[in-house]
Image (spheres, rainbow, N blue to C red):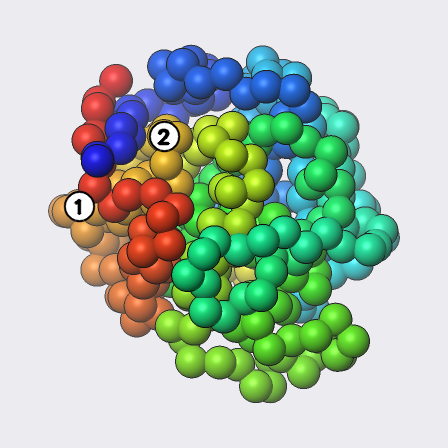
């Protein structure tokens, strides 16, 4: 069955709230709000001021996790300092979910072939629902960064990120540098992202909303300290209850664009076989690639 995806070409904080309301989805209990805090030096990430109205509306808690590579977010101490520098903690209560161990392991979907479990920040267990706020853009490893990446790499702890990048071969006893010297075939990594995304979707059992904002469209992710400037004009905001459908819709909007930067973005996505993550997530039952786009 096709999933509904809402679309508007107006990109404002107020429009984010309108899109959320149109989904008519109650997020019960304590709500985690997954964002990307932005690597130090990155110029393209969406700042906390943009997300503030919708986070306030649902009384949510902003959540993040540490990274697994060099930079300003690969330890709790450094990440907390950057959250302050980027003013997230000025506006919100921020839960760095893997700030202290032990991590939490949650089951991956039936049919997963790489991951035995998804390793996430332990305080994920404190939440009843999740709002996933995503800046859609390119990505140097995954091809693109959308809702599925936010659910997988984004919610995983530092060890969980290693687990995904190694397609389940990494053990928490290993030095994290080991994984970067022995990466698996690209499709294994993409399939592992789909498995991890499915684990988080299963954890919240339908109590989720996804909003993707297609602006500052660089081929590089917000995790890059040195990122290319945007190559495409802004496209709009999408909202859905289905992470597979919303990412497919974003890809389709890029593919069908007549923007002069379209070919550069498409080369980044397709050279990494990025759409395989969408296909793999659908195969696992995470969502549907079939969607109805409703312009609002």
- Residue at 72% x, 25% y is 91
Residue 16: where, in percent of width, then height?
44, 22
Categorize mark 1 by other alpha carbons within 10 Å: few (<14), some (14-19), many (20+): some
Residue 78, visible in the rendered structure: no
User: Please, is residue 272 above or below residue 34 in the view?
Assistant: below
Residue 230: where, in percent of width, then height?
38, 50
Per the rendering, the mark at residue 257 is 1
Toward the bottom, the furthest residue is 181
Image quadrant occupied by the C terminus: top left
- Residue 43 is left or right of residue 125, and the answer is left
Residue 79: where, in percent of width, then height?
76, 51
Quadrant in which residue 68 is drawn: bottom right
Label 2, secondary structure: give it: strand
Which mark is nearer the camera, 1 or 2? 2
User: Please, is residue 61 above or below residue 290 in the view?
Assistant: above
User: Please, is residue 176 above or below residue 134 in the view?
Assistant: below
- Residue 92 is left or right of residue 179, and the answer is right
- Tag 2 residue: 240
- Residue at 60% x, 57% y is 118
The residue lying toward the viewer, choosing from 225 and 119, is 119
Per the rendering, the mark at residue 4 is none
Question: Distance from label 1 to label 2 (Cα)?
Answer: 21 Å
Residue 245, visible in the rendered structure: yes
């Amino acid at each position: 069955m096709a999933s509904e995806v809402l679309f508007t070409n107006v990109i404002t904080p107020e429009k984010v709230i309108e899109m959320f309301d149109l989904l008519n989805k109650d997020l019960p209990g304590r709500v985690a709000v997954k964002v990307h805090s932005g690597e130090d030096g990155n110029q393209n990430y969406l700042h906390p001021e943009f997300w503030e109205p919708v986070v306030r509306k649902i009384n949510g808690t902003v959540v993040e996790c540490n990274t697994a590579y060099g930079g300003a977010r690969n330890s709790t101490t450094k990440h907390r300092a950057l959250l302050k520098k980027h003013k997230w903690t000025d506006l919100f209560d921020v839960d760095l979910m893997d700030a202290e161990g032990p991590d939490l392991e949650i089951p991956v979907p039936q049919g997963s072939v790489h991951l035995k479990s998804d390793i996430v920040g332990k305080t994920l267990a404190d939440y009843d629902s999740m709002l996933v706020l995503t800046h859609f853009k390119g990505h140097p490893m995954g091809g693109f960064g959308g809702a599925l990446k936010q659910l997988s790499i984004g919610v995983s702890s530092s060890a969980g990120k290693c687990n995904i990048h190694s397609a389940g071969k990494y053990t928490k006893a290993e030095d994290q540098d080991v994984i970067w010297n022995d990466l698996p075939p690209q499709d294994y990594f993409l399939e592992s992202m789909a498995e991890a995304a499915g684990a988080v979707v299963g954890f919240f059992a339908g109590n989720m909303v996804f909003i993707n904002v297609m602006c500052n469209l660089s081929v590089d992710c917000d995790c890059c300290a040195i990122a290319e400037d945007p190559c495409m004009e802004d496209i709009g905001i999408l909202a859905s209850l289905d992470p597979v459908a919303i990412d497919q819709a974003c890809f389709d909007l890029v593919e069908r664009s007549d923007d002069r930067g379209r070919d550069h973005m498409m080369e980044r996505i397709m050279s990494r076989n990025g759409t395989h993550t969408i296909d793999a997530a659908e195969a696992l039952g995470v969502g549907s690639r079939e969607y109805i786009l409703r312009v609002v």
